[in-house]
Amino acid sequence: MRKEIIISGQGGQGIVLAGRILANILFTEGYEVIQTQSYGSEARGGACKSEIIVSDMYIYDISMSCPEFIVTMSSQAYNRLSRKVIKGGVLIVDSTLVRKTKPRPDVSFYKVPATKIAAETMKHKIVANMILLGFLLEKLGFVKLGNAKNVISHEISAPIKDINILALEKGWKIASND
Amino acid sequence: MVRNSLSRICYNGEEGREMLAPGKHILLGNHACAEGALHVGCDFFAGYPITPASEISHYMAKWLSKLGGFYIQMEDEIASISAILGASWAGAKAMTATSGPGFSLMQENLSYAYMTETPCVIVNVQRSGPSTGQATLPAQQDVYQARYGAHGDYEAIVLTPWSVQEMFDLTVKAFNLSEKLRNPVILLADGAIGHMREGIIVPEKVKRIGRRCPESVECTPFDTDDPSLVPEMPVIGQGYHLLVTGSAHRSSGLRDYTPQQHRDTVERICTKIRRARNEIIEVDQNNIEDADIAVISYGVAARPSFGAMLKALDNGLKVGMLRLKTIWPFPDREIRKATEGIDNILVVEMNMGKIVREVERAVARRINVVLAPKVGGEVHTSDEIFQAIRRLKQ
């Protein structure tokens, strides 16, 4: 088993954090994981991407070749990456931020208004990344929610830990009802 | 006298986190390098930030002082290497980290380190050049610079990690070789391994080789009767009559330009490394006994090379692999021995062809040697290398 995952968006949305947490979750589940990230020099607003490769064997190919799961949190990222999802893969967009999309009938295409849910239901727009991470984890299909929550509680500091865990659960729940 | 540098030098050690506990962790390659340095007792770091090496500096800035060590951000790379050489003579286990452009600036004082036999570790997290090149992307183009970049005659020790685990392990080895042999050691990493997060196991116990210091102030810091040819090294400020110069010098350190004296010095500083080659050189051999084709690679390029070897084996091809964890001193004897009976060698590296020349020299044209180069900042894929292996069979 080898799966390639991309989480993308803009600086300031917690793209790198979501990627790091995802890698840690997969690592604690016992998988081989490689995670890299790229971002512009801007603290906020520049294009930002986190790439994760997960496998049950030692990973010799350390570069992405056929991403199966892509999450995008900006139009720029969507435009650049949506075509790269392999046939039969999973494309998840934050539909609050990515308004114009083109059909991809060959992939499972999910439009999740994560930023809207984060702002309205959770009162913190910033946890949209965790909603999408929860959604992604459920669609990945081989990760335990309990383990994911444990990792977040280790990775994120106390004052904002709970809201991030709630957001993750929210995303997971939306995905399981989808 | 063997001393443990961490317990000796303590600059207002603060209470804080200890080093990473033994066991499994997921870490950034550059952080694993820094953590390896902390575990082996590095207590002085001076550096100037540069992509893709900066995280080593950041990590050391954050944790070194908490463990009783000392961190300085210098004004540039020339100052950085100067600072670690001074710190080393003051008794510290010292390190700096940079990338190609910074490594170029360090060459003059790197030569000084060879001549003065100053232990230190220099990490070059290679990026794609020449010049500023592709600042954030990996390459393996500094292979010859690490061997021949500094002026004069010397023997370089250069280690190349292929994983985050080896960023830790080979940093430990770099320090230990450096202290034991009184020679700079270069960890030649690259932007892909440095910038990738991956699982590592921190060992229960990390081997620490301490510095051999003379018992008496009447000593010869620059010559020895010991068969290792590595003189004991005094510490500045502890009563030794010490003179350290990059100019030709006698065993005492006093300048001496006579031909015989300098010949003896240069021969000794080269021979001490040549004598220790078996301890320095590590080559990971896989499946080579039954192979017709040997893939030879190192550092990041060895990762997809190994994957390609597995694919080739699955396809019924007789392929083996030699992964060079040490590239200098060049493991020519090991390669010659391992490739007896081999028809073809494929050398995989992220440059226009460097180690391939050394391999050709090692096998002296007895075996067909083919290069699979790659430049442009992208790491090879195992498919590309597999196709190169197949072409060799046609």
Image (cartoon, rainbow, N blue to C red):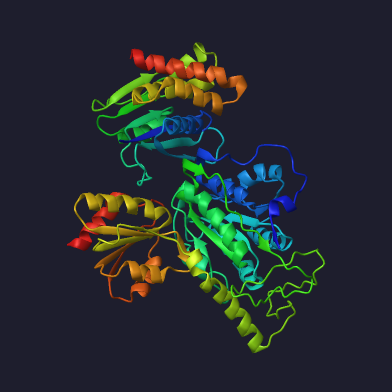
Which residue, as the protein is rendered here, is positioned at the far right?
Answer: B239
Give the x, y percent position of residue B232: 68, 69
User: Could you tell whether A88 is left or right of B149 in the image?
Assistant: left
Residue B221 visible in the picture: yes
Q: Nearer the viewer, residue A39 or A175?
A: A175
Q: Is residue B255 shown above or below B105?
A: below
The quarter of the rendered structure image containing the C terminus of chain A is top left
- Residue positioned 67% across, 77% down in the render: B223
Residue B106 visible in the picture: no
User: Could you tell whether B62 is left or right of B307 in the image?
Assistant: right
Q: Nearer the viewer, residue B276 or B393?
A: B276
Give the x, y percent position of residue B158: 51, 63
Give the x, y percent position of residue B60: 64, 46
Give the x, y percent position of residue A144: 40, 22
Which residue, as the protein is rendered here, is positioned at the far top?
Answer: A121
Which residue, as the protein is rendered here, is positioned at the far bottom?
Answer: B259
The quarter of the rendered structure image containing the N terminus of chain A is top left
Q: Is residue B257 shown above or below A97?
A: below
- Residue positioned 57% across, 47% down in the render: B205
- Residue positioned 56% across, 75% down in the render: B270
**What is the number of callouts on the image?**
0
- Residue positioned 48% across, 67% down in the render: B278
- Identify the image quadrant of residue B184: bottom right
